[in-house]
Image (cartoon, helix red, strand yellow):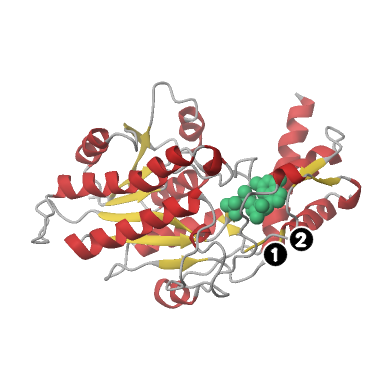
Amino acid sequence: MPKRALITGITGQDGSYLAEHLLGLGYQVWGLIRGQANPRKSRISRMCADLSFVDGDMMDEGSLVSAVDKVQPDEVYNLAAISFVPLSWSQAELVTEINGMGVLRMLEAIRIVSGLDKSRTATTGQIRFYQASSSEMFGAVEETPQHETTLFHPRSPYGVAKVYGHFITRNYRESFGMYGVSGILFNHESPRRGTEFVTRKITLAAANIKLGRQDKLHLGNLDAQRDWGYAGDYVKAMHLMLQQDEPTDYVVGTGHMHSVRDAVRIAFEAVDLDWREHVVVDPELVRPAEVETLCANPARAHAELGWRPSVDFVELIRMMVEADLRQATREQEY
Ligand code: GDP
């Protein structure tokens, strides 16, 4: 019998890479789809022809119980979230509902469908649960690099909601013996990254400026530093986390930090342009509370999962610029 996986957040960057990875491993994969005629469904259907869909909404407990009951998954990957940090100041309550309470709702759905209670005996087999935790939980970092037991100090409503999701997952593990783990993933990017995130904003602008379709690129804090990796590598770590004998949480990152300015320089060098002629620093884009630096210590993931990133920062930015150049050139020819 092939294993069955249910992925929430299927229409996002990580959802598509994870679905491809699991389908490649022989899984049957369902994506949770929200709303009527969701316009993002056709895109992911084109990318993954063998993917199935099930209706459900992270705001609606009953719909999650029905989805889990229908799919009867071996593994649930909760990637559903409002993922753009700045939005979390203007829609703090909504972000808390989806990114925080949504995790509780899915845990409850799994608990109900598997008949888990305090006696810790599941009646219908163990459903393993992956929660997409985030390096944003470290926020104003208490130490560098950050590992699994570094104290959290979130700096945005997004980060605060993710901390709730992280601890409620651990609590269901401790309360009900559920196999639930959190992957504390550092920033991970790809040509499929949303254009609102800084790496993709930069690589798309470099391509458009090269082709004469844009002149200026407005950015906020150029000094912010992140540990940026390739999303295609990170979904493999998600899967590995659910294959261990004992459930535990893992930090996933490259262990190397770069600034927004580095990303700009590498992207513009890739198209033979001088970034200083095009980048405008816009105070409007500076955040109310900034996360200045984030850097992973992925030692546990290396040792226990045997996980290693395959794409470094320079390769990542160049891969994204090349993809954006190809896409922009196609659009121009069209
Ligand atoms: P995040 O780490 O999940 O918030 O990912 P982002 O890609 O949105 O932001 C990474 C860093 O880039 C943050 O410290 C931002 O303040 C910084 N940054 C600087 N300029 C920009 C910009 O124009 N857009 C975005 N999204 N981030 C920017």
In this rendering, does residue 190 appear at all? no
Quarter occupied by the C terminus: top right
Quarter of the image holding residue 56? top left
Specify whether 200 is left or right of 305: right
Kind of residue at disc 1:
His
Kind of residue at disc 2:
Asp
The residue at the far top in this view is 37
User: Where does residue 87 sit, x and y in percent of width and height?
Assistant: 56, 40
The span from disc 2 to disc 1 (Cα, nearest Å) is: 6 Å
Specify whether 38 is left or right of 280: left
Specify whether 265 is left or right of 56: right
Residue at the spot of label 2: 262
Q: Residues within 10 Å of mark 2 (few under 14, many from 20)?
A: some
Query: What SS does tag 1 mark?
Result: strand
Beta carbon of the mark 2 residue lies under 8 A of ligand 1: no
Instruction: Please tell me which residue lies in front, 266 or 101.
Output: 101
Specify whether 55 is left or right of 93: left
Instruction: Please tell me which residue lies in front, 330 or 65.
Output: 65
Query: What SS does tag 2 mark?
Result: helix
User: Where does residue 216 sit, x and y in percent of width and height?
Assistant: 84, 39
Q: Are marks 2 and 1 in contact (CB under 8 Å)?
A: yes
Q: In the displayed structure, would residue 128 be above or below residue 141?
A: above
Residue at the spot of label 1: 258
Instruction: Please tell me which residue lies in front, 160 or 307.
Output: 160
User: Where does residue 86 sit, x and y in percent of width and height?
Assistant: 59, 44
Instruction: Please tell me which residue lies in front, 198 or 159.
Output: 159
